[in-house]
Amino acid sequence: MTVSVTFAPHDEAFRQDVRSFIAENYPAELRVANPETDLTKEQSLLWHRILFRAGRLAPHWPKEYGGPGWTTVQQYIWDQETALAGTLPPLAFSVTMVGPVIYTFGNAVQKARFLPRILSGDDWWCQGYSEREAGSDLASLKCKAVRDGDHYIVNGHKIWTTLAQHADWIFCLVRTDVSAKPQRGISFLLIDMTTPGITVRPIITIDGSHEINEIFFEDVRVPAENLIGEENKGWDYAKFLLGNERTSMAGTGHARRALAELKSVAAQERAGGAPLLADADFARQVARTEIDLAALEFTELRMISALSAGRDPGAGASLLKIRGTEVRQRIAELTHRAIGSYGMVLRHELALGHNEPAPGPDYGHTATERYLNTRKLSIYGGSNEIQRNIIAKAVLGL
């Protein structure tokens, strides 16, 4: 089942232009199995800088801050077409997360200082939210910032910090008032990663890759001018950021691309002498997933329609986050099952062998890494359990 959307003639022309732009400009060297770990920092920025030069980098930003001035429908088309084409998105921590916080809540000096360097790719940002015992319960964070004249002195720890090994800056939630209610004593600080007292320590994941890190702050002096908005109001800015992140996590374009790959794999793999896709039970699970994806796409389109009309979609971001991540996890699980034993070997285990070719079809060589990586989708950005609590309160009034 495929959701068929009829666009107005000018929007259809825009979609064709997007497809042509990608086909003509996307670097072939970025088409790797796991771009988060298989590319260098400079390679990761290639597409970012191409988009920047073309004025297409930040489709959701207002034009006054460097966005292209596209309509909500055009933004949706761009997101869908780039995902379907399998392009590497610009770094979300910079463009999707901290950028909108700065242009919405930052002062004029902060906007002039940080926004152009986010757009150009000169600054690579990471996110300092989670801590030990402060993941889903983020308001219990303990990383502390004490005002000392024109600076804050930051001490504490952050964990699961994605791609911090490349970062020039980190946006951090820090506790500035230990006596206030948890959500009221938090501030939003921008911290230069070259500041003395910062230590980045890698966390090697089960697939042998280095994508996440923990960060230690020891008497780190941060200029008070790097405070976003008001002191102790950081929770409000954090919720704004997470709302943007969750909306983008519906991932319907990525899911449609992954679903097409699943069908291709299942058509090639055999079960009882016939294609796996002909197996009634497996075909039923694929169909169920495809139906759920179609329902998610229609829900996303309803929210796009509401936004286009200037209406607030309410707790819709939480709904998109839950269903979007569940669908993508299910597709990854079914793909891994379809590939079977050929997908069980991790690439770093192959590297420990005798440089022999990996067994089985090419699509099996990174299946386990991709399956394991999708397990995090329902956790980051606020776990799906937290999203259900938000919907229960905001929609159902429980």
Image (tube, rainbow, N blue to C red):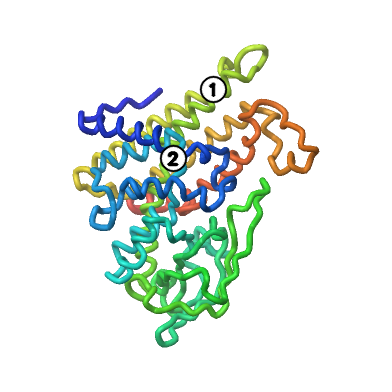
Secondary structure under badge 2?
helix
Q: What's the residue at 71%, 36% (across, down)?
A: 345
Work out which quarter of the rendered image holds the N terminus and state it: top left
Q: Nearer the viewer, mark 2 or mark 1?
A: 1
Asked where in the image residue 223 lies, by quadrant, the reply is bottom left
Asked where in the image residue 106 lies, by quadrant, the reply is bottom left
Label ID, residue 324: 2
Q: Point out the tag, 2 or 1, that comes first from the N-terminus.
A: 1
Q: What's the residue at 69%, 40% (across, down)?
A: 346
Q: What's the residue at 58%, 24% (across, down)?
A: 265
Percent across and percent down for residue 381 are 46, 53
Percent across and percent down for residue 167 are 51, 61
Residue at which label 1 appears: 264
Residue sitting at the far right: 354
The answer for how far apart the CA atoms under marks 2 and 1 are is 21 Å
**Rendered position, 132 above or below 277:** below
Foreground: 73 or 125? 125
**Rendered position, 110 above or below 11:** below
Residue sitting at the far bottom: 149
Foreground: 191 or 118? 118
Percent across and percent down for residue 45 are 47, 50
Q: Is residue 11 left or right of residue 116?
A: left
Q: Is residue 165 left or right of residue 2?
A: right
Disc 2 residue type?
Answer: Gly
Disc 1 residue type?
Answer: Ser
Label ID, residue 360: none
